[in-house]
């Protein structure tokens, strides 16, 4: 993957805030042509810097939580991360440093459904412990 420059980083920042921002708007903001922005975004997609365009949504009664996961050394962390990522209700999975090895952001319609997801994570081979924190509010 080749290096990205400051303009690429600015484009990424705009798209992180709103992935549907028109290229013409980005171009005006950065003093570029629309074609230049389109080429740069295409390049970032090909390089894998931008993996996908997605939406953030908030449902009124939805519960979100962060689950910190400790793993046992017998099972590679990437295998556990993949299994967690494939579970229904898992939004994001990060392999991290520190006391825990994996951080998962999960969502559910209610506490029972949330508990079910957490139990599914706990039942994955190689998971030795979890610590769950319910998200009370999100500020952007």
Image (cartoon, rainbow, N blue to C red):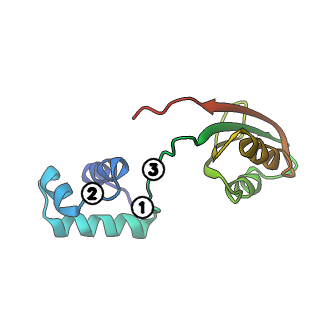
Question: Is disc 3 surrounded by few (<14), some (14 to 19) or many (20+) residues within 10 Å?
Answer: few
The image quadrant that residue 61 belongs to is top right
SS for callout 2: loop
* Residue to which mark 3 is pinned: 56
* Badge 1 vs badge 3, beta-carbon distance below 8 Å: no
Q: Residue at x 71, y 38 (%)?
A: 111
**Residue 21 — which label?**
2
Dot in front, 1 or 3: 3
**Residue 18 — which label?**
none
Q: Residue at x 64, y 46 (%)?
A: 109
Give x and y (percent) for residue 9.
Answer: 31, 50
Depth check, front residue: 137 or 111: 111
The image quadrant that residue 98 belongs to is top right
**First-in-chain label (3 vs 2):** 2
Q: Residue at x 24, y 52 (%)?
A: 7
Check the image and name the residue furthest to the front: 61
Give x and y (percent) for residue 116.
Answer: 78, 46
Give x and y (percent) for residue 16.
Answer: 37, 49
SS for callout 1: loop
Q: Quadrant of the N terminus?
A: bottom left
Q: In this view, does 43 lie to the left or right of 59?
A: left
SS for callout 3: loop
* Residue to which mark 1 is pinned: 53
Q: In this view, does 6 lie to the left or right of 96?
A: left
Dot in front, 3 or 2: 3
Give x and y (percent) for residue 90.
Answer: 65, 51
Cα gap from disc 1 to disc 3, whole angstroms: 10 Å
Cα gap from disc 2 to disc 1, whole angstroms: 11 Å
Question: Is disc 1 surrounded by few (<14), some (14 to 19) or many (20+) residues within 10 Å?
Answer: few
């Amino acid at each position: 993957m080749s290096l990205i420059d400051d303009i690429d980083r600015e484009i990424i920042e705009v798209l992180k805030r709103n992935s549907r921002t028109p290229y013409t708007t980005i171009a005006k903001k950065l003093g570029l042509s629309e074609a230049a922005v389109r080429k740069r975004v295409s390049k970032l997609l090909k390089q894998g810097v931008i993996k996908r365009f997605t939406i953030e949504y908030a449902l009124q009664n939805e519960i979100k939580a962060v689950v910190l996961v400790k793993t046992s050394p017998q099972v590679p962390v990437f295998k556990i991360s993949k299994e967690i990522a494939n579970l229904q209700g898992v939004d994001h999975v990060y392999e991290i440093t520190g006391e825990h090895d994996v951080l998962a952001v999960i969502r559910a319609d209610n506490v029972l459904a949330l508990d079910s997801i957490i139990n599914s994570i706990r039942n994955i081979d190689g998971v030795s412990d979890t610590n769950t924190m319910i998200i009370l509010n999100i500020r952007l």
